[in-house]
Image (spheres, rainbow, N blue to C red):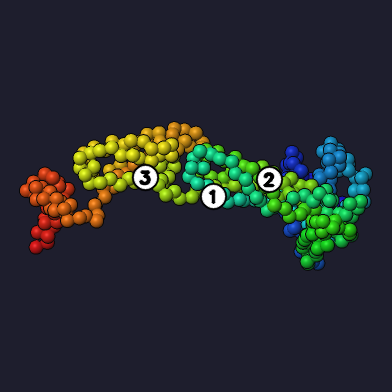
């Protein structure tokens, strides 16, 4: 039919790849297809020229002959007396044959083999378990491969048959005007096969529900938000597909004494106002037992002491954290008359030198006084 250069017709170079050839033809065929240009003889002829060019250039043997001998190399292959290729049909031919790669390989059967779903298990740990590491037993409800049918879904001794609706393709094509839409086959649900005699144990699913018991080692130093991946311990795949993974999500419960911040620990220790004033020695709890902490004289409430190396070893490595001890001066309660009398005597002895004995209190009230003076 056409003696025009096929590469020129498609607007491509001679070293264009198969993908470029298909892409160029797709774009032009959409524009000139007769279904989109009814009663337009010029568009119809243009479409036939494009189809002729595509049939030659998309075939490696014909393309090689055309590249070497031009039109003479392909005129004897059914091209001579006019174009009789397979692209003169309706628009669905192009949609299915040329645009099929959009839907994953030219409308071929979608594989029924699918990977199993990943699962998540929320695991609560005490701070001690998280810091030191431990081993936990997990009971995980999941889907496992059916042992009766070996995961096929068919009754032992039988097998699945090719779906009669889609011919094993897993998809059916619906024509809507000049568009052809591929949809999942309603009979086999995309599997391409149907089971006429399903397994009595799994009812044709190939998988059954089961509660698995797993032992998992928790590494030392984990923290809330960390995940531990157990490969292949998720749901079983369908029709022989690989199993998914199980992700153990760690949550560390609150501790009655310590608060955690990454690799560091914090705790508050109450001390008497006598120990705070005169100094003393405190028993401080750590995750490894008690240690002695020397409190210097005149220690104020809220003072923070650092015990190096008494924190946590990070799960990903690095230096050990510290324990931060915050001392809280406790006001005495339930005083008897004698104790109250002694405190009043103490107050009288410090009243004259209050600027010296309570510098923060003195400085605060001086600031308050100045604040009100500035307002007047």
Where residue 71 appears, x then y in whole percent? 86, 43
Residue 288 visible in the snapshot: yes
Callout 2–callout 1 Cβ contact below 8 Å? no
Give the residue displayed 66% in from the left and 51% down from the top: 140
For this rendering, which residue is in front, 66 or 338?
A: 338
Can you identify the residue that label 1 sits on?
A: 124
Task: Please name whichever residue, 211 or 205, is drawn nearer the observer in this view of the structure.
Answer: 211
Q: Quadrant of residue 324?
A: top left
Depicted 125 relative to depicted 37: above or below: above
Left or right position of 284 against 173: left
Camera-side residue of 340 and 216: 340
Per the rendering, the mark at residue 267 is 3
Q: Quadrant of the C terminus?
A: bottom left
Cα–Cα span, label 2 and label 3: 39 Å
Compare residues 251 and 72 and report the one nearer the observer.
251
Tell me where residue 303 appears, x and y as whole percent.
27, 43
How far apart marks 2 and 1 lie (CA) works out to 19 Å
Classify residue 356 as left or right of residue 246: left
Left or right, 361 with respect to 87, comes to left
Q: Is residue 159 visible?
A: no
Q: Nearer the viewer, mark 2 or mark 3?
A: 3
Q: Which mark is residue 233?
A: 2
């Amino acid at each position: 039919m056409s003696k025009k250069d096929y590469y020129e017709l498609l607007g491509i170079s001679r070293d264009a790849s198969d993908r470029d050839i298909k892409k160029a033809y797709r774009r032009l065929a959409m524009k000139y297809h007769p279904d989109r240009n009814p009663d337009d003889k010029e568009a119809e002829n243009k479409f036939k020229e494009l189809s002729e060019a595509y049939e030659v250039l998309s075939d490696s043997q014909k393309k090689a002959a055309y590249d070497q001998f031009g039109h003479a190399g392909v005129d004897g292959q059914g091209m001579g007396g006019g174009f009789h290729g397979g692209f003169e049909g309706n628009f669905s031919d192009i949609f299915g044959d040329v645009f099929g790669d959009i839907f994953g390989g030219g409308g071929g059967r979608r594989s029924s083999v699918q990977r199993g779903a990943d699962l998540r298990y929320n695991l609560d740990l005490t701070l001690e378990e998280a810091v030191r590491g431990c081993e936990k037993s997990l009971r995980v409800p999941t889907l496992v491969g059916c042992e009766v049918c070996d995961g096929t879904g068919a009754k032992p001794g039988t097998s699945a048959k090719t779906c009669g609706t889609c011919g094993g393709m897993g998809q059916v094509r619906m024509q809507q005007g000049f568009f052809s839409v591929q949809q999942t086959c309603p009979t086999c649900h995309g599997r391409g096969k149907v089971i006429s005699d399903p397994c009595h144990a799994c009812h044709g699913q190939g998988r059954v529900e089961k509660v698995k018991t797993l032992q998992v080692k928790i590494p030392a130093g984990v923290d809330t938000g960390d995940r531990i991946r157990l490969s292949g311990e998720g749901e079983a795949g369908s029709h022989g597909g690989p199993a998914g993974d199980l992700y153990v999500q760690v949550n560390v419960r609150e501790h009655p004494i310590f608060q955690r911040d990454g690799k560091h620990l914090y705790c508050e220790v109450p001390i008497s106002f006598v120990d705070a004033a005169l100094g003393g020695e405190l028993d401080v709890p750590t995750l490894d037992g008690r240690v002695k902490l020397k409190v210097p004289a005149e220690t104020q409430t809220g003072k923070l002491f650092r015990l190096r190396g008494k924190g946590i070893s990070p799960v990903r490595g690095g230096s050990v954290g510290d324990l931060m001890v915050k001392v809280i001066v406790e006001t005495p309660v339930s005083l008897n008359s004698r104790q109250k009398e002694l405190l009043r005597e103490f107050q009288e002895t410090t009243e004259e030198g209050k600027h010296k004995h309570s510098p923060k209190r003195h400085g605060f009230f001086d600031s308050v006084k100045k604040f009100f003076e500035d307002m007047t």
